[in-house]
Image: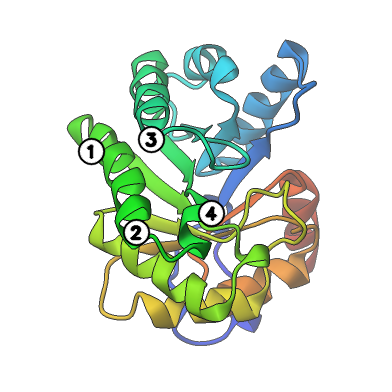
Amino acid sequence: MFVLNAVGPGIRKIKFAKYFDHTLLKSDATETQIKKLCQEALQFDFASVCVNSYHVPLSARLLKNSGVKVCTVVGFPLGANLTVVKAFETRKAIQEGAQEIDMVINIGALKDGNEEKVHCDIFEVVKECRLKNVLCKVILETSVLTETEKRVGCRLAKEAGAHFVKTSTGFGPGGATPEDVRIMKSAIRGGKLGIKASGGIRTLSQVLELIKAGATRLGTSATVTIMQEYNASAG
């Protein structure tokens, strides 16, 4: 199935399920839950599963030779790790089978106006990703940023060679909003970066609004429920 006409003109006609990173990042996630996550991802043919790095080897084994990628998070959820630690974490995760990396920027450095530090932080992770042809998504945590900071974060991610900018960790004080996605889309105008919306996405109506605003990927743990709602609405 493809995106509903209700989304509006100009939306890329890709398989609806491929908008989603099927996500489970809770600290108490068990092996049984990760297996279920991967089975659901295969059933619906989502873009990826997004798991903590501990679960990458299992996920990679379960999803081997499928169209579903393994995504993991780096510097998560606070972003305040040393850059060298983020780079090492990225390299090891890729060695274990990760095909996409969602890294959290140094949020405090961005708010301090230390653009050089933020750029370096992103660049070192991107470098590890590009060595192995792995996608890098840069999490801004938009709910704690001003509009100016959001725009600066997008610019720095673009300059550092990232593939996506992403709204939120899902562990901050707020999640994805259409307005934040529109700001990010405006900030990367002329670039080839994707936009991932994540955090607090629970319903089909939210998904459609975020896609309409410019999101090209969505991260949520409610993916199955959303797909069931979508399939029912599509007849």
Q: Secondary structure at mark 4?
A: helix
Residue drawn at x 69%, y 28% is: 37
Label located before the other in sequence (2 or 1): 1
Classed neighbour count for the residue bearing mark 3: other residues with Cα under 10 Å, few (<14), some (14–19), many (≥20): many
Distance from the alpha carbon under mark 4 to that under mark 3? 12 Å
Query: Quadrant location of the C terminus?
Result: bottom right
Secondary structure state at the residue bearing disc 2: helix
Q: How many marks?
A: 4
Furthest residue in direction bottom, as rendered: 9
Question: Is 230 situated above or below 73?
Answer: below
Tell me the SS state at disc 3. helix
Mark 1 residue type: Lys
Circles 4, 1 touching at the beta carbon (< 8 Å):
no
The residue wearing badge 1 is 127
First in residue order: circle 2 vs circle 4? 4
Which residue is labeled 2 in the image?
157
> What residue is at 55 percent from the left and 74 percent from the top?
181
Q: Position of residue 21 (x, y in %)?
A: 57, 45
Which of the labelled discs sits on residue 107, or is there none?
Answer: 4
Which residue is depicted at the point 40% across and 71% down?
A: 152
Q: Earlier in the sequence, mark 4 or mark 3?
A: 3
Q: CA distance from mark 2 to mark 3?
A: 15 Å
Q: Disc 4 or 1, which lies upstream in sequence?
A: 4
- For the point 38% across and 28% down, which residue is it? 90
Foreground tag (2 vs 3): 3
